[in-house]
Amino acid sequence: VGHAVLAINGAEVNGRFTADGKDVLEFLANPANYPVSIRFGRHRLSSNEKLMLASMFHSLFAIGSQLSPEVGSSGIEMLETDTFKLHCFQTLTGIKFMVLADPRQTGIDALLRKIYEIYSDFALKNPFYSLEMPIRCELFDQNLKLALEVAEKAGPFGPGS
Amino acid sequence: MSRSPGRKQENHKISRELFVLTYGALVAQLCKEYEKDEDVNACLDRMGYSIGIRLIDDFLARSAVKKCRSYSETADIIAQVAFKMYLGVTPSVSCSSATGNEFSLILDKNPLVDFVEELPAERASLCYCNLLCGVIRGALEMVHLAAEVTFLQDRLKGDAVTEIGITFLRKPEDRKQRR
């Protein structure tokens, strides 16, 4: 049904194995290990999958702006489904920030603008970050995490991703 | 300069003198490394460009300006918002062509040359503040506006005022769908 095992008894699971190399199915088959607590959830996307989805969305965004009956449309700002809302903010420089959140989550607009500030501070002002490359800046990740936590607390339900 | 509420109040202001000295040291070093003024000017322009392409997002994120609908609006924003935000001065803007794509920014005060009176004789065609031209050019390019930015007049060279000329190179109608 699209869900995968994320953790067993608190320890994170990667595919079929736990962090210390135990085979998950074997562990679950052995009654001596019961009771056991299992956390299920949606699979985290790999970097490749993220790139692929982002480039598909980029094309949809461009098509959306062209098809729009309004002249100078700002493109797709929000995509709403039953289970999540995808918010997109495009800067005047053409960078798109996308946030996937629970449909009931509020304050995403403010979050997107905050992320823009964080990007302009900790990615762009880092002289070792090259434009258009994946962002591997410690400070960027830290501040992004903080901003997400603030946004989650503010909204009635979490989490964003 | 407005900051969003969540931001920590970090008032770590760096001294203006340090900034001006740093810029001066940069230009002095370039003069040592390059004999020709044109080379120094080109180098300053390149450095300014790489600052501009990054600075633009900082500017847009903090000033929340909306998309400009004309070159004239763009020139006004550069003078009244950007220069004010980053250098604390507000040059005056004038349109210098009938076609509406050439503008001049007249700088009354220029913090970068606070401590410089005039150029030495052997550096007569040095554009001391050419970094600024590169910054403007780079920033405009990132919002898909190609422009040529140069110093038209320079007090350091004996002119009456310091004037930066911005020439926008493409008509707004020609602008392609942004990426």
Image (cartoon, coloured by chain):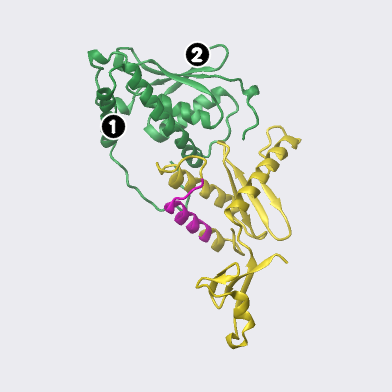
Does B23 lie within the magenta span? Answer: no
**Region in magenta:** A134-149
Residue at screen point 61% across, 84% down: A30
The chain holding disc 1 is B
Confirm whether residue B72 shows in the render. Answer: yes
Q: What is the magenta segment's predominant secondary structure?
A: helix
Is disc 2 surrounded by few (<14), some (14 to 19) or many (20+) residues within 10 Å? some
Confirm whether residue B90 shows in the render. Answer: no
**Mark seen at residue A113:** none
Q: Quadrant of the C terminus of chain A?
A: bottom right
**Mark seen at residue B20:** 1
Residue at screen point 44% across, 50% down: A137
Residue at screen point 62% across, 23% down: B172
Where residue A147 sits in the image (x, y, percent)? 50, 56
Taking the image as shown, residue B34 lies to the left or right of residue B176, namely left
Is disc 1 surrounded by few (<14), some (14 to 19) or many (20+) residues within 10 Å? some
Taking the image as shown, residue B47 lies to the left or right of residue A32, namely left
Where residue B122 sits in the image (x, y, percent)? 24, 13
Chain B: colour as depicted: green
Q: Amino acid at mark 1?
A: Val
Q: Amino acid at mark 2?
A: Ser
Same chain, labels 2 and 1: yes
Where residue A18 sits in the image (x, y, percent)? 54, 72
Q: Is residue B149 above or below residue B66?
A: above
**Which residue reaches farthest bottom?**
A32
Q: Quadrant of residue B135?
A: top left
Chain A: colour as depicted: yellow
Report the residue marked by disc 2.
B96
- Helix or strand or loop: what does disc 1 sit on? helix
